[in-house]
Amino acid sequence: MVRTGAVLGACGVLVIVVAAGALGAAGVGSAVSGALDGPAERTLVVADVETGERYLSTPVENGTTVALEYTHSVEKSRVYDEYTVRGDRLEMTRMEFESYGWGLPADANVTLENGTFVYDPDGNVSELTVKPGRVAGHRLHVGDRTYDLVNRTDARSVRIHVTNRSTIAATFEDVLP
């Protein structure tokens, strides 16, 4: 009995799939399939550019703030790029930086707020590609949570995007091969 429990514990997902297939033969497969799929939810995904390995999957909703914060490699000053989730896209809503440097907007409509330059850009993207740097110390903010992208990804290039997936898929995605 204990051995069976251990096998079921280790293969619980497989048992669900087999049971759903067996019920499908009995004519109730679509009901079970719908229950397994569940309602889709938006998820912010951080995945390795080369391998697709997921370093982070976290639920988001419309209006969730997603931001990258890092130290500019030349200016050695803080840069903060803020995005807002809009459907499956990331709308850039704010950029903050402390000094002008390579890659920062020099001729845009920039204002000064408490010693920080603030730029409110237009546009949105379906994904961001980021190369977390050990000197830059890239951090990812999602809502009220902060993730160290350098440690989480071992400084490997990542793709950050929003996807829709079911709750059950979100739960078991990283468990199944």
Image (cartoon, rainbow, N blue to C red):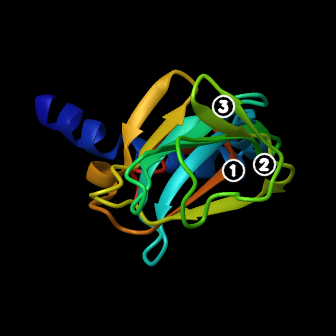
Quadrant position of the N terminus in the picture: top left
The x, y position of residue 118, in whole percent, is: 69, 37
User: Distance from label 2 to label 1 (Cα)?
Assistant: 6 Å
Q: How crowded is mark 2: few (under 14 residues within 10 Å), some or many (20 or more)?
A: some
Disc 3 is placed on an element classified as strand
Residue at image x 51%, y 34%?
A: 141
> Is residue 140 toward the left or the right of residue 143 in the image?
left
Is residue 8 in sight in this rendering?
yes
Distance Cα–Cα, label 1 vs label 3: 15 Å
Q: Please, is residue 63 above or below residue 90 in the view?
A: above
Circle 2 — which element? loop
Residue 101 falls in image quadrant: bottom right
In the image, which is nearer the foreground, mark 1 or mark 3?
Answer: 3
Give the amino acid type for the residue marked by disc 1 in the picture: Thr
Residue 23 lies, in percent from the top left, at: 65, 43
Q: Seen from this angle, which residue lies furthest bottom? A: 50
Does residue 60 show up?
Answer: no
